[in-house]
Amino acid sequence: MTKSICILGSTGSIGVQTIDVAKKLGIKVVGLSAHKNVDLLIKQARELNPDILCIVDEKYYTVLKENFPDKIVVTGHEGLISIATYPAADLIVNALIGISGLVPTVEAILAGKRVALANKETLVTGGKIIKRILSQKQAKDSIPVLIPVDSEHSAIFQCLVGEDKKNIKKIILTASGGPFRGKKLKDLQSVNVEDVLKHPTWNMGRKITVDSATLINKGFEVIEAMFFFDKKCDDIDVVIHPQSIIHSMVEFIDGSVKAQLSYPDMRLPIEYALTFPERGKAVAAPLDLARVKNLTFEEPDFDTFFLLKIAYECAKKGESYPIVLNAANEEAVKYFLEGKIGFVDIMKYVAKNIESHRGQKVESIQDVLEIDAEARQKFKNLVEGEKN
Ligand SMILES: NC(=O)C1=CN([C@@H]2O[C@H](COP(=O)(O)OP(=O)(O)OC[C@H]3O[C@@H](n4cnc5c(N)ncnc54)[C@H](OP(=O)(O)O)[C@@H]3O)[C@@H](O)[C@H]2O)C=CC1
Ligand SMILES: CC(=O)[C@@H](O)[C@H](O)COP(=O)(O)O
Ligand SMILES: [Mn+2]
């Protein structure tokens, strides 16, 4: 059972819930990181007394150091690596957003750590490289080096305990459908940030909430599932399930389907990642299906939410395509949240970035980071070019 953890991104939605779960489980938190939210990081550190703290935005270093003169205080991207490889931690919880989580995941694995991975962009962008690194690491025991925190992948992981992967016929990812389920493109032209951030079932950070509204989040989860469970994207389906009670399913070759259910509460997959192969105390409310009454399912609308279709195409092509998809999307979401582009523009500009991309082989993390940087610049040129 995990005894001590570092949390990369402790001040975010997953990070805060991880602290709650760690406290309930009596797990020691020895390292915390934030990007800019130094006030919350100080509050968390006062309560948890970790050994090491990282504030990525270096202008807050002095504030942190003055508050914790006797602690290790690190900054910037290098600081994240210090947290990700901190000797006293059994397990690293990666709760960062975007590709910022990729190198810390790689460094943690190379340092012999297990990683509870919420940061799906790690596998979207670096899945091929991570898979190669993991294949070279002898698993110390039956516990995988990378444990999924993403609710769907945790659900699949739970369904696969005691199963032979060769008997998997299909993975079925469930999706809430987001705040605009049932809408058509013509209805989405004037939706604003507030509308987009009203997720119907989950309370999450801003970026993933926007990704759930465009459904690219589910596209990323298809790619994430490919790497977690060694399946091709053709064997990974998406079904719209508005209640978010079934967190995903596995269909086996004999036609039997296993599912994992609970109320939508991320503390459950977080706890499972921290306690696997045991189970912890119940943090999520016990499920009362009689109260839920209906569990409904629909086909995804790939025409309106075409980024899901594009994500499948990128998943099939692999190599640089998922990296460009993620980079363009990260930039587009940032522009949208800053009020610089509209909601439908997110999908339009990301699609344009992919259309004009000429695929490249990816052989190293350096390749990933270069392709990412190039794609971000191309996105900016595209948007600025259209504005001028
Ligand atoms: N929230 C959820 O319920 C779920 C989230 N996930 C995935 O988990 C990950 C985290 O999501 P969520 O908790 O919602 O995100 P949040 O935006 O709520 O939190 C992100 C955390 O990362 C820090 N951070 C942000 N940008 C950077 C950066 N460039 N470098 C270093 N640190 C950074 C933030 O610091 P600061 O606070 O200072 O900005 C914060 O601590 C994402 O990959 C998401 O897709 C998956 C399933 C569910
Ligand atoms: C809680 C979680 O895992 C999120 O990824 C969630 O699934 C997003 O909701 P959608 O199902 O709407 O994408
Ligand atoms: Mn998810």
Image (cartoon, helix red, strand yellow):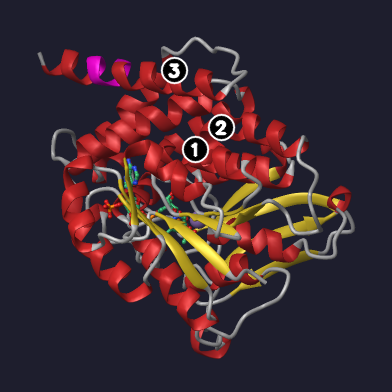
**Residue labelled with disc 1:** 102
User: With 65 as the anchor, is 29 left or right in this view?
Assistant: right
Which of pointers 1 and 3 lies earlier in the amino acid sequence? 1
Structural distance between the alpha carbons of marks 3 and 2: 12 Å
Which of pointers 1 and 2 lies earlier in the amino acid sequence? 1
Residues 21 and 216: in front is: 21
Q: Quadrant of the N terminus?
A: bottom right
Please, what is the three-letter code of the amino acid marked with disc 1? Answer: Leu
On screen, residue 180 above or below 243: above
Structural distance between the alpha carbons of marks 1 and 2: 7 Å
Q: Image point 54% across, 43% down: which residue?
A: 105
Structural distance between the alpha carbons of marks 1 and 3: 13 Å
User: With 350 as the anchor, is 174 left or right in this view?
Assistant: right
Quadrant of the image occupied by residue 2: bottom right
Q: Are marks 1 and 2 in contact (CB under 8 Å)?
A: yes
Q: Secondary structure at mark 1?
A: helix
Please, what is the three-letter code of the amino acid marked with disc 3? Answer: Glu
Quadrant of the image occupied by residue 279: bottom right
Residue 140, image x, y percentages: 79, 53
Q: Image point 79% across, 65% down: which residue?
A: 161
Which of pointers 3 and 2 lies earlier in the amino acid sequence? 2
Residue 74, image x, y percentages: 33, 46
Identify the magenta region.
378-382
Q: How many marks?
A: 3
**Residue labelled with disc 3:** 370
User: Does 379 appear in magenta?
Assistant: yes
Please, what is the three-letter code of the amino acid marked with disc 2? Answer: Gly
The yes-or-no answer for disc 1 within 8 Å of ligand 1 is no
**Residue labelled with disc 2:** 126
Q: Image point 77% across, 61% down: which residue?
A: 160
Q: Is residue 202 visible?
A: yes
Q: Which mark is residue 74?
A: none
